[in-house]
Image (cartoon, helix red, strand yellow):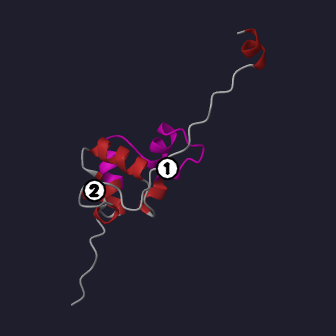
Amino acid sequence: MERQANTGWHPADIKAALAKKGWTFYSLSRHLGHKNANSAAAVIQKPWPVVQKLIGEIICIDPAEIWPDRYNTDGSPIGCVRRSYPKIREVGNSKSAAVA
C-alpha cells in the first residue's frame, strides 16, 4: 500500500468553509485589490502565503492545518524567501538642497 502525501483540505471544503463565513474567492480577490476577479482561487493550485493566511483568519483555522504540505513544522511557509532590498538614499528636490 502506497502512502499518500498529506495534501490537506479538499478545495471544495475550503470553498464551503469560506461560504459559511460569507466569503467567495471573488470577494477575497476584491478584498486584496486584485483586478482579476478570481486571482485568489489560484491558492488552490499553488502556494500563496498571503491568501492562505487570510483564508485561515476568515475560517479561524491555522493555514498549516489547511495546507500541511505547504508549511514547515515551525509554521513558516515552505520555500518562501524574504527578500531584503538595499536601502535607497532618499532623493530630494535639488532646489531645496541648494537652499539648505
Q: Give how far across and how far down residue 75 sits, in percent.
A: 27, 54
Q: Which residue is mark 1?
A: 83
Q: Is residue 4 above or below residue 60?
A: below
Q: State the mark number for residue 18.
A: none
Q: Quadrant of the C terminus?
A: top right
Select label 2 or label 1 by which is in front: 1
Q: Secondary structure at mark 2?
A: helix
Q: Give how far across and how far down residue 25 sits, in percent.
A: 45, 49
Q: Amino acid at mark 2?
A: Ala
Locate residue 53 relative to residue 84 in the image: left or right: left
Q: State the mark number for residue 64.
A: 2
User: Which region of the structure is painted magenta?
Assistant: 15-40
What residue is drawn where x is 59% and y is 48%? 36
Locate residue 62 relative to residue 25 in the image: left or right: left
Label 2, label 1: how far apart the Cα atoms are:
22 Å
Report which quarter residue 65 is drawn in: bottom left
Sequence order check, earlier mark of 2 and 1: 2
Q: Nearer the viewer, residue 85 or 29?
A: 85
Q: Marks 2 and 1: CB-CB under 8 Å?
A: no
Q: Secondary structure at mark 1?
A: loop
Report which quarter residue 45 is drawn in: bottom left
Q: Quadrant of the N terminus?
A: bottom left
Q: For label 1, count other residues whose C-alpha is less than 10 Å away and answer few (under 14), some (14-19) or many (20+).
A: few
* Residue 55 lies within the magenta run: no
* Residue 35 lies within the magenta run: yes
What residue is drawn where x is 48% and y is 50%? 40
Q: Is residue 80 above or below residue 33?
A: below
Q: Amino acid at mark 1?
A: Arg
Q: Give how far across and how far down residue 4 sits, in percent.
A: 27, 79
Q: Give how far across and how far down residue 44 sits, in percent.
A: 42, 60
